[in-house]
Amino acid sequence: MSFISYRFRHLAAASLLALAVPALSPSVPSFVSPALAADTPARGGTMNIIVQPEPPMLQLGLNQQGPTQTVAGKIYQGLLTYDEKLDPLPSLAKSWTVSEDGLTYTFKLHENVKWHDGKPFTSKDVIFSTTKFLPEVHSRARANFARCESITAPDDNTVVFKLKEPFPAFIRAFEVASAPIIPAHLYEGTDYRNNPANATPIGTGPFKLKEWVKGSYIHLVRNEDYYKPGLPYLDNIYFRVIPDAASRALALESGQVDQSQYNDIEPFDVARLKEVKSLNFTTKGYEFIAPVSWLEINHRVKPLDDKRFRQAIMYAIDREFIRDKIWFGLGKVASGPFNSSTKHFDSSIVPYAKNVDKAKALLDEMGLKPDAKGVRATVKLMPMPYGETWQRLGEYLKQSLKQVGINVVLESTDVAGWVQRVSNWDYEITTNFTYQYGDPALGVSRTYVSDNIRKGVMFSNTMGYSNPKVDELFTAAAKENDAAKRQAMYSEVQKILVDDVPVVWLLEMQFPTFVSKKFNNVITTGVGVNESYDSVYLSKP
Amino acid sequence: MAGLVPFLAGRMVKAVVILFAIVVLNFLLVHAAPGDPAMVMAGEAGAADAKFVEQLREQFGLNKPLHEQLMTYVGTVAQGDLGFSYRQQRPVWDLIADRLPATLMLTLSAFVVALVGGILLGTLAAINSGKWSDSAITVVALLAYATPIYWVGLMLILLFSVSLGWLPAFGFETVGAGLTGLDRLGDILAHLVLPVFTLGLFYMAVYARMTRASILEVRDMDFVKTARAKGLRESRIVFGHILRNAILPVITVAGVQGGHLIGGSILVETVFAWPGIGRLAFDAVLQRDYQVLLGIFFFSSVMVIVFNILTDLIYTLVDPRIEVAK
């Protein structure tokens, strides 16, 4: 497919979305290509999507693993979803207003929405989810809704969130996995984690769970009572569990599955699959999570506590090589802590470039002289156990750090051991990445602020990095209602962090999504494959 | 066969003691691994706080002292209950029972194919020893024995599924086809061909090599010469005299493999997305899903013990000189 027609399809996708829902966001173009008018979406069809690993459960409030989100994002819905620029789009909320002082968020809900068991959906469910269910079981939602002074429902279709103090990131807290709306009539007053309803998730989304054959597939069927007339188009979605990466690539190639996402396809298979005529390739649709990968460094261990040592690592490695040879071109070299898709990214920051002499000079300055074998220091590196690519990265780092006299001892572990050791600070260097959820206050500051140094908690400030100025700027920026002032603070904090190198940033990660060309409107927003898929349709043969 | 009843009774008593030891050892081993299921789930969620992990530990019963957890576990197993997987929100027995048919179908078919094929090929190679057919069989068996099983699987998929399009590559059956009766059976059998051949090939090589070596040892013995001198047909000599004596070591190895049938095959199940117990066990290790892992260990321990007893009994059938010991 040529570049031009890809663009057209993409525009058509966006415009269909705009037609399907009352258009409220100005960022969705309302342009319809006459050439595409012939290809009107029709009802029907089955989509086969890889799901890997198999989710432990589909109750999205209780479990937010990647695969759970991809499947349950079609069953459950949040109040909002987000476009590629991370501006809000309607989902269960059809419109919303934010008061001038940034304290009151008012959502108008769609009317005539029904749960999959036929019961009506109302503001009562939103109140239950955001005041009771999610604060009890969902770590991120707990932090976000704790900022509310009150959450009230003046009527069945209106919900009002009153904040204690301004928190502009709040508008990005309503995506389906961040705040899925849970049916109050099934969960109110129960033991949420042991509720039998967890096995048969009931949502408001365009697809309902029909059958889950553990180890084989999850079958979703069209929700006939979906509140958007005529939608969804597809009759069935099957999520197929294919545990082996090579088998997954073959399944896509042979057309047995229509879509793969996230890490389903190993980077080394991507180039080959891009050539497959029946598949479209994109790295779009991950803007909301926007991960940045890094070398996580334990500042409690000498000489890792010295920022010159961390800068030396930054200068010793060639991140373009890492991107091109280890990730086979997937990703962008990260300039600093913010992903360029995340709000308030400062594009003026120049990324560190490989400079072996500078690295050596910094180490010399620290007094780390090479011994007889040329070794200045020995550090332990434990690559994260998330597949082959991270192991290759570990081997590369061992070699490239050797050039500046840093001897690396590789350690290996599995997921359970890794989480155990990293969260309890029992490591020297590891690799890691986190999702940024669109806003620095939601997904970036947690890694660097010192009040998030909490032993035993994964994805906190496990390095033990502490800089009072950084704490102050992140705290102030999160509450700042004025966009320009907020940007100034976030720019400043980015500059400080880039100089301090609390972690050695590697790449703004990109995930390959392959979708069969038979399907249209698949990746239309910044939430990508975790979207509801209510407007996905199958081209006529 | 007079000693059969005391033999079985004695083995049963031993089995109970062994099983108890297995349960306790397994329990201690899986808990010795770093990390726990709550940690794994916190790691998978991509975000966590202390409360999240605490709630999961409490739900999974991991906040109690280890010896208390062990007592509880031994108690439930003694009552014939394998426990509950909190991660999957289902009783362990249900999880195993769900996967059992697929696993048995795969491993039993592969077992039969391997045993029959291996003994036949081994015999053929032995009676033609030194000729080209012997060399061919030996070389192929060596290759099949030495090639990584997942690689064989992938190559078979590439050839028969992607290039030729003859056979389905993944899964247990065609999902969403709504087949019933004989059509469904045919569909499942088609899905079974590649994984069975892949798994069977390795063991077939093992049996073929053992059978050949064993026959070569037996065929020059005096009783074979006697049989020949009596003027018996060659086929009668091979199957009635040589093979019957040569097959004991093969039965020993087959007995060991038989005990592992229930454990499935992690590699083949992974490559072919076959929903069997091997994958369930492998996932349970990574996820520290203790109850599931212990359940599978227990269940396969029982099978190993049963197959060992069966193997001992089969010895006495094949070779009447062997008697079951008290």
Image (cartoon, grey):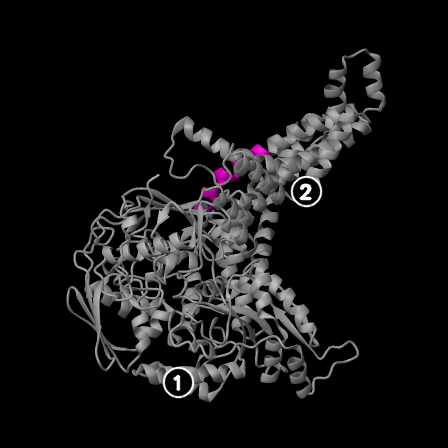
Coordinates of residue A2 in the picture (x, y in percent): 43, 51
Tell whether position A424 is magenta.
no
Residue positioned 32% across, 83% down in the render: A480
User: A291 left or right of B125?
Assistant: left
* Label 1: how many Cα within 10 Å (few below 14, some 14–19, many 20+): many
Q: Nearer the viewer, residue B95 or A279?
A: A279
Q: Nearer the viewer, residue B323 or B59?
A: B59
Coordinates of residue A332 in the picture (x, y in percent): 50, 67
Residue A132's disc is none
Residue positioned 61% across, 75% down in the render: A354
- Principal SS element in the magenta part? helix
Q: Nearer the viewer, residue B183 or B40?
A: B183
Q: Please, is residue A65 above or below residue B91 in the view?
A: below
Q: Establish whether labels 2 and 1 are both on one chain.
A: no
Residue sticking out furthest to the left: A155
- Specify start and end residues of the magenta stretch as a single range: B94-110
Q: Please, is residue A431 above or below residue A361 in the view?
A: above
What residue is shown with label 1?
A: A489
What residue is shown with label 2?
A: B147
Q: Secondary structure at mark 1?
A: helix
Q: Secondary structure at mark 2?
A: loop
User: Callout 2, which amino acid?
Assistant: Thr
* Label 2: how many Cα within 10 Å (few below 14, some 14–19, many 20+): few
Coordinates of residue B218 in the picture (x, y in percent): 80, 27
Q: Nearer the viewer, residue B118 or B297?
A: B118
